[in-house]
Image (cartoon, grey):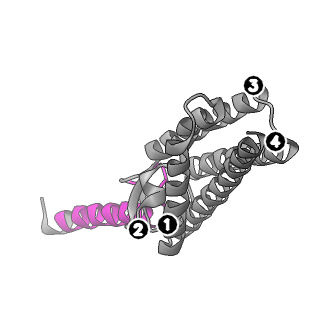
């Protein structure tokens, strides 16, 4: 092989490597990306607030009555919120498989909430919060599906969408916390 041919082949290989590196960096979930993942760096204040609310609900579950089906099912709902990427102050690598796991957990929690809405009798206020929690689960599912299907989403836009999804989880957790708080107060008042 002549020197000119070797130089041409090396230039083509270098251009292909550069092309795929650029695609991988700018479009992490693209089908042309070599490593389909993104490193999500959450807002530390959001993580701190989220973790505090999560710990409060976990404590509420631990103190709840074992005979109460509403309190008993809280453990299954909390699994949706107890995820590393939501509670870690460090950057977390998120792949499409991770998003599949998130979607699964959200669907399971939504089904538990729907079961609660049909099996238990609640006051109008608690029913309103329960409905809001179900709607939040649907919004989270939609956001997760958008992220999973976003092959040509840039890295910056993916970071923004993950941040928005984190915020949606936070508001959903807040609604769930409000629902259980109001439910607990009703139980205390009825005793």
Query: Could you classify mark 2 by the number of other residues whose Cα lies within 10 Å: few (under 14), some (14-19), or many (20 or more)?
Result: some
Q: Position of residue 44 (x, y in %)?
A: 47, 73
Q: What secondary structure is the stretch in magenta mostly built from?
A: helix
Contact, mark 1 vs mark 4 (Cβ under 8 Å): no
Q: Can residue 8 be seen in this view?
A: yes
Measured in 3D between alpha carbons, the distance from the residue under mark 3 to the one under mark 2, in whole angstroms, is 38 Å
Q: Mark 2 points at which residue?
A: 89
Question: Where, by quadrant of the figure, is residue 138 drawn?
Answer: top right
Contact, mark 4 vs mark 3 (Cβ under 8 Å): no
Give the residue drawn at x 27%, y 67%.
11
3 or 1: mark nearer the eye: 3
Q: Position of residue 90 (x, y in %)?
A: 37, 67
Contact, mark 1 vs mark 2 (Cβ under 8 Å): yes
The dot on residue 47 is 1
Measured in 3D between alpha carbons, the distance from the residue under mark 1 to the one under mark 4, in whole angstroms, is 28 Å
Magenta extent: 6-33
């Amino acid at each position: 092989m002549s020197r000119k041919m070797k130089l041409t082949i090396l230039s083509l290989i270098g251009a292909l490597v550069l092309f795929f590196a650029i695609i991988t960096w700018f479009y992490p979930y693209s089908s042309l990306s070599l490593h389909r993942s993104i490193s999500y760096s959450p807002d530390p204040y959001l993580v701190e607030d989220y973790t505090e609310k999560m710990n409060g609900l976990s404590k509420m579950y631990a103190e709840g009555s074992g005979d109460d089906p509403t309190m008993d099912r809280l453990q299954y709902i909390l699994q949706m919120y107890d995820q590393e990427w939501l509670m870690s102050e460090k950057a977390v690598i998120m792949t499409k498989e991770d998003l599949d796991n998130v979607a699964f957990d959200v669907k399971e929690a939504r089904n538990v909430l729907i079961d609660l809405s049909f099996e238990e009798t609640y006051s109008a206020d608690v029913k309103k919060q329960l409905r809001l929690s179900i709607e939040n689960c649907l919004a989270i599912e939609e956001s997760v599906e958008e992220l999973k299907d976003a092959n040509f989403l840039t890295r910056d836009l993916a970071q923004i969408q993950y941040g928005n999804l984190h915020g949606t989880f936070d508001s959903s957790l807040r609604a769930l916390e409000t629902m259980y708080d109001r439910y607990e107060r009703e139980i205390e008042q009825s005793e």
